[in-house]
Image: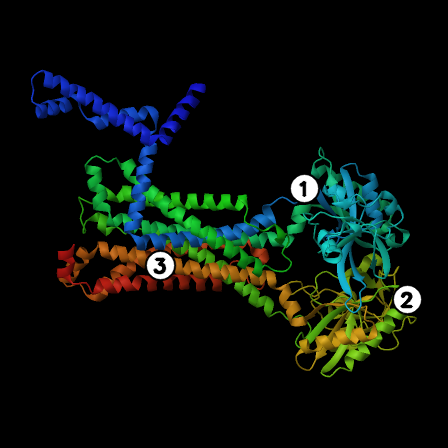
Amino acid sequence: MASRIREVMRRVAGIMRRGTMERRLDDEMRFHIDMLTEQQRRAGVAPEEARRRALAAFGGAERFKDEARDEYRSRLGDELVQDVRYAVRVVRRNPGFATAAALTFALGIGASTAMFSVVNGVLLRPLPYADPDRLLVVWEHDVARGHDRNVVAVPNFEAWRERSRSFAMMAGLVPLPATIAGAPNPERVMGAEVSPGYFRMLGVTPALGREFSADEERAGGADVLVLSDGFWRSHFGGDSAALGRTLPIDGRPHTIIGVMPPRFDPPRFGWLVDQAFWRPFGPTDGNRSWGRFLLVVARLKRDVPVDAARRELEAIAAQGAREDKRNEGWSTTIVGLGEQITGDARLPLLVLLGAVGLLLLMAITNVANLTLGLVRRREHELVVRRAIGATTARLLRQIVTQSAVVGAIGCVLGLAAAVFGMQALLAMLPPEMPRTTSIRVDGAVLLFTALASLAASLGVGAIAAWRAGRDGASTLRESGGGRAAARLRGGSLVTAEIALGLVLTVLAGLTMRTFAALRAVDPGFDAEHVVVARVGISGPRYRSPEAQRAFFDGLLTRVRALPGVQAASTVNTRPFSGIGPATVVGSATAPVAGDSIVADVRFAGPMLFQSLRIPLVAGSTFDTRDDIDAPPRVIVNQAMARQLWPNESPIGKRARVMMFNGITPEVIGVVGDVRLADARTPARATAYLADTKFTSPSRDVIVRASGDATALVASIRAAVTSLDPAVPVYEVTTMDALIGRTLARDRFTAVLLAAFAVVSLVLAGVGIYGVFAGDVAQRRKEIGIRVALGAPSGGVVAMVMRRALTRALIGVALGTAGALVAARAMASLLYGVGSADPASFVGVAVLLLAVAVAATLVPALRAARVSPLVAIRVD
């Protein structure tokens, strides 16, 4: 081993001192020849003859040099240097080829690198926590209804934490929207309540101060805060003296005890989004009765497999069902924290990465076509060089080296394009895309670029070298009109380009049709000319239900009086805002287990249905009888009426709603079905309760305008300020924009795939044109003879077109098979269109065939106009 290392080091040193070693070799060869010459001169031979005899006796100096070079450096290294220099000269002599090939390489490598940067940041980069693979999210599982990721009841969380032996730590989390006083500019921020030890479980400690203590949990939570670094810097200027100061949260002073480090990126999933601060969470008698609302994150012990922890929690859940009837039919679900955070973003990003990989393959195929064209123009040169002693391996290695040089240029250009492309992708990303702060060009991305460039270069070189090796040997024997010329060179690449282009275009077509179908979905309400704003009141002034109702009644009175307002109302959660409150409901006259269903619950103002133009099907809406002290009444949608009271009117009947320790409101009306979550989610059973009775401190104000709804925003803010300057107005948007936001992911996928498809069609067209233009040029003599013998122009065109269509049909067949597999893999992303939609496949196949015909038509017409005399003489 040591001798081998010394050998390698000697050869490396020889390469590094190449100039010096060459001078020494020249001096040594000259010395031996001079000595032989001197011997001949002493024997009486004339100087010139003596020199000639000395050279003849010594033999070839270059042969001895090569033998000496083999002792101190690798001949392969020398040849590689020569090949690189030769490749550079070839590229410089063919600027058109070099420009087209490098730019095509850059397109494929740049697009794939930009897409990989996003995938790497969102899906592949490890979470910024200690041993992140051991972090899990624990959900409750409603077995009967198939809801496997349900929020957790506090008593069940306590049971898991106390009885489980599989977890090192377990923490509960509750999103906490809060108002920070500061009139006239009050601020609404999102925080979270977390169990003490939560930060320690993630492996992160505060940069300043401390985290929460067990005593602060036992107290049911305390008025202390840990701030994020961004909030600390924006509100306290990064002053360490902020520790110990108080910050009013919802009207209550909270003491700042810690600040998290800048690198801390808290987990975001469900409705746990950006977090500016954290407050301690502790179980209390009150929140134990709230039902299921808690998010739970746990750290698995190192020696415990996930399956064992899952079985243990299922056993604890089964024991809980025996102890408490409210847990009957419930179990548990465990999901990795990384999988939970990336959630719905995983499949679209993987589809886009696969699509851009196909685009890279098309770029490689196109560059291979260009390289083959250059090799065809140099075939006679290559065969002559082989005839005078060059080995086939050396010639093929030069072709591969030429591709590597072009690939290196494309790599540099592609990396520059990737930086700009990544910025464009970041601007296009849907708002709910997780981990966007992790997207950047780093070592992994640079390694991907280098490997992609190397693979692309070697792929192009291998294809070109293989074709050159297969075709070149017969070039001298079969000039122009023989079998070598008759065979379509590059035909398999045409087939590959059409197949790849068809897969990409089919996927783009399916996603575009999905987006169009989602845009056409009827949400169940009229979103035009509607603006919605969130208003949150807090503090001692608004703690009573009467004070909350008085504020919103006064606000609605002012808003309805504004010019241009047709209707205004409040609701606890606006439509198309994702997850909202839900509970078990049933008919009050039926057994609990007989007819209970899960229904969405909305606390609505009397004019909500007029504001959103939700049709009233039967009965009436809320009025002044729905006071705080009045018996509860409910309005149900058609889906709930069908499920609980099929074939009969629900008006006057009583529903059983498992909220507020169980209520049985009278049904006073039936309204149309509304898609509350998003366009993909069908309308579920929904119960509307009057928010004048069931008050809340935070509500959405929904306003219908007679004209431009955005013109009312300033007036709505002014109305709130006139009531209380310390109340914030936030999340202001139009309903049209809100619906568009829920379609952002589908729009992102459709736009990118459509862009990839357009580029693939252009590459396919250029590639097909290049192959058949070269084919016609190679067959000029044959075509000239055919024309001279009387072949009609139409026959010549048909001959060329027939070759093109044959390859195109094979490509369509292969592409259709690949597209069926790819579409089935992304079936969950589709809506309103099947993964094997015949219209999409047939339409794309016809489009690709049209591209093939159009790209072949120009060289076909050129072939038909060829002059026999010119063709034969030139050839």
**Amino acid type, mark 1:** Pro
The answer to whether residue 1 of the structure is visible from this angle is no
The one nearer the camera, 222 or 774, is 222
In the image, is residue 765 above or below residue 11? below
Asked where in the image residue 45 lies, by quadrant, the reply is top left
Report how far apart the C-alphas of labels 2 and 3 lie in the structure: 72 Å
Is disc 2 placed on a helix, strand or loop?
loop
Disc on the earlier residue, 2 or 3: 2
What type is the residue that disc 3 sits on? Val
Residue hosting label 2: 544
Q: Nearer the viewer, residue 259 or 284?
A: 259
Q: Which residue is mark 1?
A: 132
- Please identify the quadrant where the N terminus is shown: top left
Give me the disc on residue 766.
3
Residue at (81, 43) in percent of width and height: 160
> Which residue sits furthest top?
43
